[in-house]
Amino acid sequence: MLLQSTWFFLWGLLWAVFFITDGFDFGIGTLYPFMGKSEQDKRMMINAMGPLWDGNQVWLLTAGGVTFAAFPLVYAVMFSALYTPLMLILFALILRGVSFEFRGKVEHPAWRRLWDACIFIGSVTPALLFGVAFANIFQGLPLDQKYMFQGNLLTLLNPYGLLGGILFVLFFLVHGALWLAIRTGEGLHARAVRTANVLWVPLVLAAVIFLIYSAAATALYDNYLARPYLFGVILVAVAGLLGIKIFLVRNAFFKAWVASALAIAGATFFGIVGLFPQMLVSSLDADYSLTALNASSSPLTLKIMLAVVLLFIPVVLVYQVWAYHLFHTKLAREDLELEGAY
């Protein structure tokens, strides 16, 4: 039980880290056609995430790998039930990566407009669909006794799922605007600050509605009501949301970004803690649900994996902290002339 619980927590943590790191990339890409007023602005936005975006996606591979190795049955059912949205996410991520590299290969306005559109599509699609997927996991999927998904893409596009998608998009938009406020100057910096302030209001409204709707659409609050101290997880998300606004007012943009990361982590763990020990809830019959106990690998596998994770994850974290420290300074026009610039 302890091993399975530990891996359940690590599973949720890795998804939270992915949403925090790659979330601002999704946000910047979604803001790209609206804030990029000139070619210089667009290149500034791309280069603000340029040295980090591909490294951030390592956490997606890690989260997927942990799901496969620690909870293979969950992995199999998840990638079957959510096959369409996950494939759309995969194609969008590929499209976004290609767009960064290709848009500067030809000096022609039509060529750049094509890849600019691809950057937007490749950013907003994963942001929306990750939210839809996780909201449906929180709500429950129509799984039968053989763990077969009795539905289609439209089944996932229900009101609660779409609300989850909108919430994720808003989280990432604010997160991305704050990163632009940190890394850019002049007009783009001012627009990023203004955008973060404006979007903070709908983000808070969407978060409040999602919390209320979750009480009606899911059983997430059962764990919270049984153990009231768990409401501290929700307070973490609330503190993060309030911290964004407080630090924006003080022009402390990096602290506002950290507060945004805290809010994203709190929002992710709101669902993870509410699910425990279930991982894939069946909306057809509770007996058909997959849990951390009935879907995990053998204890020996979990022990070996835990040793590997405890050894290598700190190394990856140290590397990423160093990378973020290295690229935390504001971009200048001269940086766009460097050989490695997008």
Image (cartoon, rainbow, N blue to C red):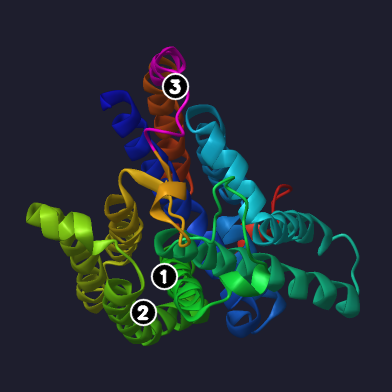
Q: CA distance from mark 2 to mark 3?
A: 35 Å
Task: Say above or below: 303 vs 330.
Answer: above
Horizontal and vertical percent for residue 318?
39, 31
**Frontmost residue, 179 versus 280:** 280
**Which of the two discs, 2 and 3, labels the residue nearer the N terminus?**
2
Does 2 appear in magenta? Answer: no
Horizontal and vertical percent for residue 341?
69, 53
Q: Secondary structure at mark 1?
A: helix
What kind of residue is marked 3? Phe
* Number of disc labels: 3
Q: Tags 2 and 1 in contact by the CB under 8 Å rule?
A: yes
Rate crowding at label 1 as few (under 14), some (14 to 19) or many (20 or more) other CA atoms within 10 Å. Answer: many
Q: CA distance from mark 2 to mark 1?
A: 7 Å
Q: Which residue is mark 2?
A: 203
Question: Which contiguous range is marked in magenta?
Answer: 292-306
Q: Which residue is mark 1?
A: 171
Rate crowding at label 2 as few (under 14), some (14 to 19) or many (20 or more) other CA atoms within 10 Å. Answer: many
In which quadrant is the N terminus drawn? top left
**Frontmost residue, 45 versus 14:** 14
What kind of residue is marked 2? Leu
Horizontal and vertical percent for residue 66?
50, 33
Q: Quadrant of residue 179?
A: bottom left
Task: Say above or below: 125 vs 13.
Answer: below
Q: Which residue is mark 3?
A: 312
Q: Tags 2 and 3 in contact by the CB under 8 Å rule?
A: no
139 left or right of 154 in image? left
Q: CA distance from mark 1 to mark 3?
A: 29 Å
